[in-house]
Image (cartoon, grey):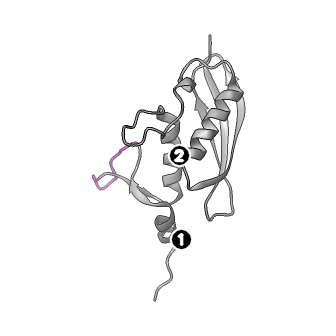
Amino acid sequence: MTTPTLLTQQRRIYGEGWSWPLRAAPTGQLARTAGEQRIDESLRLILETPLGSRPLDPSYGVPLEVYDPVTDVVALAWALAQALERCEPRVQDLTLEILGVRPSDATVAFRLTYRARGQLTPTTRTFPFYRLAT
């Protein structure tokens, strides 16, 4: 009996499927992702999906209010963190930290830190996000 590789274990735990956004692999087929990369893509997709826009899963995504001009970045961060916790069960110990506001291009930057279930090491991602009130 062979010992499963780390990637094989991650595929079993975190899934495997087409990458998002869809793109071609060097072989000309649709690119696939597996392991923790699936979680990264899922988190980004949750942040880009308005709540209620998926007919078969209307609870998926972020509330529509976050797409309005933002005046309260703390409320924005709270709404995003709640949506991520609700929609992505493969992450735990999620924290969302506001890094700054750039009125010049109407963006809020934030840092997302989480642990994938079954992992000891946290993962950190930084995102630019959303419009601000002018």
The mark closer to the camera, 2 or 1, is 2
Closer to us: 125 or 58: 58
Above-or-below relation of 11 to 1: above
Residue 119: % across, % down? 64, 63
Q: Amino acid at mark 2?
A: Cys
Above-or-below relation of 4 to 56: below
Q: Give the number of marks.
A: 2
Residue sitting farthest toward the left: 28
Residue under pointer 2: 87
Residue 104: % across, % down? 63, 16
Above-or-below relation of 69 to 82: above
The residue located at (51%, 74%) in the rendering is 5
Q: Secondary structure at mark 2?
A: helix
Tell me if residue 28 is in the magenta stretch. yes
Query: What is the chief secondary structure element of the magenta stretch?
Result: loop
Residue under pointer 1: 6
Disc number placed over residue 111 in the picture, else none: none
Residue 44: % across, % down? 52, 41
Closer to us: 103 or 85: 85
Q: Which residues are magenta?
A: 21-29
The residue located at (69%, 63%) in the rendering is 120
Above-or-below relation of 98 to 17: above
Closer to us: 79 or 1: 79
Mark 2–mark 1 distance (CA, rounded to whole Å):
25 Å
Q: Is residue 61 left or right of residue 120?
A: left
The residue located at (67%, 39%) in the rendering is 111
Tell me if residue 7 is in the magenta stretch. no
Residue sitting farthest toward the bottom: 1
Q: Amino acid at mark 1?
A: Leu
